[in-house]
Image (cartoon, rainbow, N blue to C red):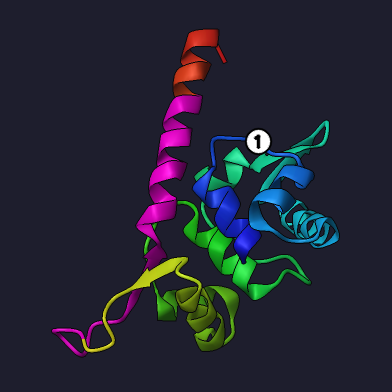
Amino acid sequence: MEVIKFFLKYSDLSFRPAHVANLLVKPEKTIYRCLGILSRESILCESHGLYWLHQSATVKPGIPPKKGCPIILAILLTLLTGQAFNESELEALFQRKLTRAINKLGKANLINRTSPEPLFPNTPKSIWLEVNYSLPIGRSQFSRNRMGELYGK
């Protein structure tokens, strides 16, 4: 969780695994395992030993997870687009109960939810990515688009 939070917070920068390990005070082996899982699920990109947040993961709409994808990463991949979903929509998309995974993401402060005691009790609970992570992602998307306009890509 800490590795994905780190890359969401600094979404416009690329890092080497050794730097991530030093900044998070974690063993390099653990960081390499996390980076392998995140790059396999197309959340991160890797080139010449540098890792960064994959641009298409933040732009394309959420897709159902591949076989063997951890459900927490699948939910994050769906929420990276900046959309808010109801719990029932996510459960229909992934075809399983998600209460434990959503609670884990909530405890890690990666997602926001409507209050447990809403004003209108019959309305479904909405889930979206935490503002601390969605704003840097939006800024990095904007800067990438500007760079593309400047350099003709």
Q: Which residue is mark 1?
A: 14
Quarter of the picture containing the C terminus is top right
* Relative side of 48 to 150, left or right: right
Q: What segment is highlighted magenta in the picture? A: 118-144
Q: Residue at point 37% right, 63% down?
A: 84
Res. 102 in view: yes
Please state the horizontal and vertical placement of residue 71, each as a whole percent of the image.
64, 74
Task: Give the amino acid at mark 1.
Answer: Ser
Please state the horizontal and vertical placement of residue 125, each as a whole percent of the image.
32, 79
* Relative side of 151 to 22, left or right: left
Quarter of the picture containing the N terminus is bottom right
Res. 42 in view: no
Q: Report if residue 76 lies within the magenta region.
A: no
Please state the horizontal and vertical placement of residue 10, each as a whole percent of the image.
53, 43
Please state the horizontal and vertical placement of residue 108, each as a whole percent of the image.
51, 72
Q: Is residue 14 above or below residue 122?
A: above
Dot 1: what SS? loop
Q: Report if residue 139 lies within the magenta region.
A: yes
- Residue farthest left in this picture: 119
